[in-house]
Image (cartoon, helix red, strand yellow):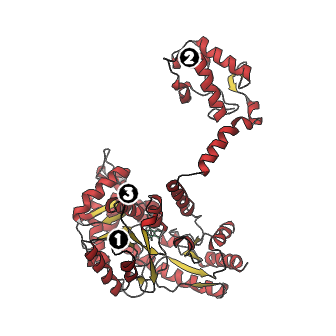
Amino acid sequence: MPRRRQATELPFVGALDRKEGQLGRQLTLVLREAIRSGDLKPGESLPSTRHLASSLGISRGLVTDAFEQLIAEGFLEAQPGSGTKVSRGLSEFPALNSVEQTKRAKAEQKLPPRAEAFAKVARQFAPLPPVPFAVSVPVGPTAPDDTWRRLGNRTRGLRSAAPSGYDDPQGVLALRRAIADYVRKSRSVHCTPQQVIITAGTQQGLYLACQVLLEPSDRVWVEEPAYRGITGILEGTGAIERMVRVPVDESGVDVEFGVRAAQDARAAFVTPSHQYPLGMPLSMVRRTALVAWARSSDAWIVEDDYDSELRYVGHPFPSLQGLAPDRVIYLGTFSKILFPSLRLGYAIVPEHLVPAFCGARSLMDRHPPSADQHSLAAFISEGHLDRHIRRVRLVYADRRMQLISIIERYISGDLAWLQPGDQGMHLVLWLAYTIDDEAVTAKAMDAGVSVRAVSPMYSEGKGKPGLILGLGGYTNEQMEKAVKKLAVIITA
Ligand SMILES: Cc1ncc(COP(=O)(O)O)c(C=O)c1O
């Protein structure tokens, strides 16, 4: 039986207007409307007349009159011993709410363009079930080991890790120091801890970069295809017309094309270590050309370096930031190499931009949660991150080779083929052009296989069908089972 609601749990009755007078009539109206709109549900108990009267500061007689009126109209029912309830019979008359519901449903269907763009992103970013081939699902050997938990407990116990006031919007200094040291050694990034801003992952870094660097009329280069995390922001903030899609070939983003199409662009959003989603690194010639363009056009390069730790053959290219620290906003994340629910990443920006990024950050969500920053600082500075990277790199390299051989065994090359590449934690499986990748994705989901479609990563009408397959920590048996299911779906 639903418990009796307290008077304080009926916020709508607080809207009685004393100056208007006729408080009993007003109460009748708001209760009737609350029942119609579903704020009060059939069978729900109302507060006693005495409590409601005292909380509203009106006489008990007025409340009793209002209840009696609504009982007479059939909205309420009184039962000896159990007080007054919303009539249970009302649930048999869905028409009661239908006007309101239809109005609401219509309003929801007809979203303004920006709201519609964000709603589309919500559909595309809905987390996938943690089964093959959802990306960034570290399990077993690719998940951080007990050290992570131990450090968490240790740092939470320290006073500095659990401050009670607001913290620095730029992030905890110990973590900024650890990151500056880590990216200097591993990615040839030139920076001081003063230039590091801790973010809630790369996604927030992209948002901050758009807010801080772009004026409403600025044009922007975006790769074709590109990560929906950046095209989604530009679409949702009304910059869709000013997004210049620059094609990607085997050497990465085609800088000459970009210069011809929009030399005056204010920024280029790129994934030079491992183009997302296709996987090729940006060649040295193109890197030099990109930096030359940025310098001559007074433009920014936003370098999304999301998974450069996972290179299995040879040496990675050093970061673009190292070539032009004054022109590049470097974005890194712990989502890939550790785990995405950590929600910690970093933006490394030229020093004069730091206050602007911190201001934008303060307005967005003040600052990153402090305790995990201290744990991560200890994890990096005590050498655990380096050990973790060495361990998972071997696992991912092995899983990658296994997955490639399973796909070649079960899926016909006429229907699907792999994009060449040698790094990262996902593969792109191209599909024959007659196959609808979004339909395959939906059917795969029904069959218990998590994949994402490639075509939405292209601009409207240019999409090529393909699937993103994440490696995670899945076993060979899990991958084989999932590939067999995919083969059936693709063949059908
Ligand atoms: C290209 C690209 N950048 C960045 C990220 C990571 O985003 P975040 O750090 O917000 O989890 C991803 C995750 O899938 C990605 O694919």
Mark 1 vs mark 3, CA separation in Å? 37 Å
The residue tagged 1 is 265
Report crowding for label 2: few under 14, some 14 to 19, many 20 or more residues within 10 A (C-alpha).
some
In primary-sequence order, the first of circles 2 and 3 is: 2
Q: Residue at x 53, y 75 (%)?
A: 471
Seen at 57% across and 73% down, the residue is 461
Mark 2 or 1: the one toward you:
1
Q: Which mark is residue 447?
A: none
The number of numbered badges drawn on the structure is 3
Q: Residues within 10 Å of mark 3 (few under 14, many from 20)?
A: many
Residue labelled 2 has its Cβ within 8 Å of some atom of ligand 1:
no
Q: Could you tell me which secondary element the residue under label 1 belongs to? A: loop
Question: Residue 372: which disc?
Answer: 3
Instruction: Work out whether residue 399 or residue 252 is closer to the camera in this orientation and state it.
Output: 252
Q: Quadrant of ligand 1?
A: bottom left
In this rendering, is residue 180 above or below 102? below
Query: Percent x, y for residue 363?
Result: 34, 50
Residue at horizontal 64 percent and vertical 42 percent from the top: 103
Which is nearer the N-term, disc 2 or disc 1? 2
Mark 3 or mark 1, which is nearer the start of the sequence?
1
Q: Is ligand 1 within 8 Å of the beta carbon of the residue shown at mark 1? A: no
List the residue tagged with mark 2.
23
Left or right: residue 259 compared with residue 143: left
Secondary element at tag 3: helix
Element assignment for label 2: helix
Q: Relative to 392, is 351 on the left or the right?
A: left
How far is disc 2 from disc 1 in space, using C-alphas?
A: 62 Å
Residue 252, x across and y down, in percent = 42, 82
